[in-house]
Amino acid sequence: MSAVIEVENLHKSYGGTVALDDVSFTVRQGEIFGILGRNGAGKTTAVECLVGLRAPDRGRIRVLGRDPGRDHAELTRRVGVQLQDSRLPERLRVGEAMRLYQSFYPDPADSGELLARLGLAGREKTPYGKLSGGQKQRLAIALALIGRPRIAVLDELTTGLDPHACRDTWDLIAGVRAAGVTIVLVTHFMPEAERLCDRIAVIDAGRVLVTGTPAELLQRAGQPTLEDAFVALTGRTS
Ligand code: ATP
C-alpha cells in the first residue's frame, strides 16, 4: 500500500516545553491510523503540523506528496479535519454551517445525507449554541467529511458522546474508510483504538514509542488488552 502521509523526525517546542521529539510515522492509503497517547503526549501538535496549522521546528512532512506548510490551500481541499475544541458561532444554524462548508469544495457531499448518517437529521434549523455536546461533536465530524476528503483527520472523535452514540460513530467511521478515505484518528480511548485502527502509533512525552497493528502491540508488550499494553509500554495509565 502506498504512503499518503510521511512524517520524518518532527520536532516542536513551545518555549521550554518539548511537544514533539523526533516523531516519525507513515500512514498508508486506505487505513485507519491511530495516534494514541495520554493527555499532553503531543498528539494534537502532531496533527496540527500534519494539516499545516502549526509549523514544526524541524522535520519533514508530506501529505499526498505535498508539504502542508507550503501547500496548505491545496491540501485543505483534500484533507478533512475535525479538531478538538473546534467551535462555531452560537447563532449559526446547522444547515447554514453545512452550506458554508460545502461552498469551500468543488464537489461536496450531500448535506442531508451526511447529517442523517450522523444522527442530526431534522436539526438543520437548530443554532449551534443549542446543540448538546455530543451533537456539536457529530456536526464537527460532518463538517470534516463534507468535502469528500481523501484523508480525514479526527481528533478525539467521541469525546462527549454516550456509549450508544460512540458505537454509531465508530460504525460511521468504518463506513467512511470502506468508501476509500484514509483516516488519522487521534485518541486516548483504548476501546476506540482497538475497535477501529489498523495500525497505531503510541506516543508519549512527544516521542513515538512503538508503531504497529493492535495485535502487534499486544504481542510486543506481552499483554492481553490494549489498555494493559499501553500501560506496559508507557509506564502510565491512559
Ligand atoms: P490532549 O489530549 O490533552 O489534547 P495532546 O496529546 O494532544 O494532549 P498537545 O496538545 O499536543 O498534546 O500538547 C503537547 C504538550 O505541549 C503539552 O505539554 C502541552 O501542555 C504543550 N502545549 C500544547 N500547545 C501549547 C501551546 N500553544 N503553548 C504552550 N504549550 C503548549
Image (tube, rainbow, N blue to C red):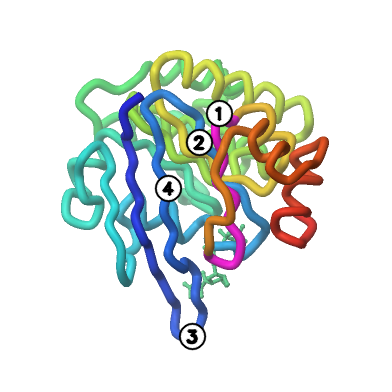
Ligand 1 within 8 Å of disc 1? The answer is: no
Label 3: how many Cα within 10 Å (few below 14, some 14–19, many 20+): few
Part of the protein shown in magenta = 197-206
Kindly tell me whether residue 132 is visible in this rendering.
Answer: no
Q: Secondary structure at mark 3?
A: loop
Measure how far apart labels 1 and 4 are at the Cα level. 14 Å
The quarter of the rendering in which ligand 1 is drawn is bottom right
* 160 vs 123: above or below: below
Kindly tell me whether residue 162 is visible in this rendering.
Answer: yes
**Residue 199 on the magenta segment:** yes
Residue ID for mark 4:
25
Q: Secondary structure at mark 2?
A: strand
| Place of residue 183 in the rendered image (x, y in percent of width and height, measured from the top left) | 46, 32
> Quadrant of residue 157 in the image?
top right
Residues marked 4 and 2 touching at CB (< 8 Å) = yes
156 left or right, relative to 230: left
Give the label, 1 or 3, closer to the camera.
Answer: 1
The amino acid at mark 2 is Phe
- Please identify the dominant SS of the magenta region: strand
**Residue 97 on the magenta segment:** no
Residues marked 2 and 1 touching at CB (< 8 Å) = yes
The amino acid at mark 3 is Gly
Give the label, 4 or 2, closer to the camera.
Answer: 4
Q: Residue at x 53, y 65 (%)?
A: 206
Q: Residue at x 46, y 51 (%)?
A: 89
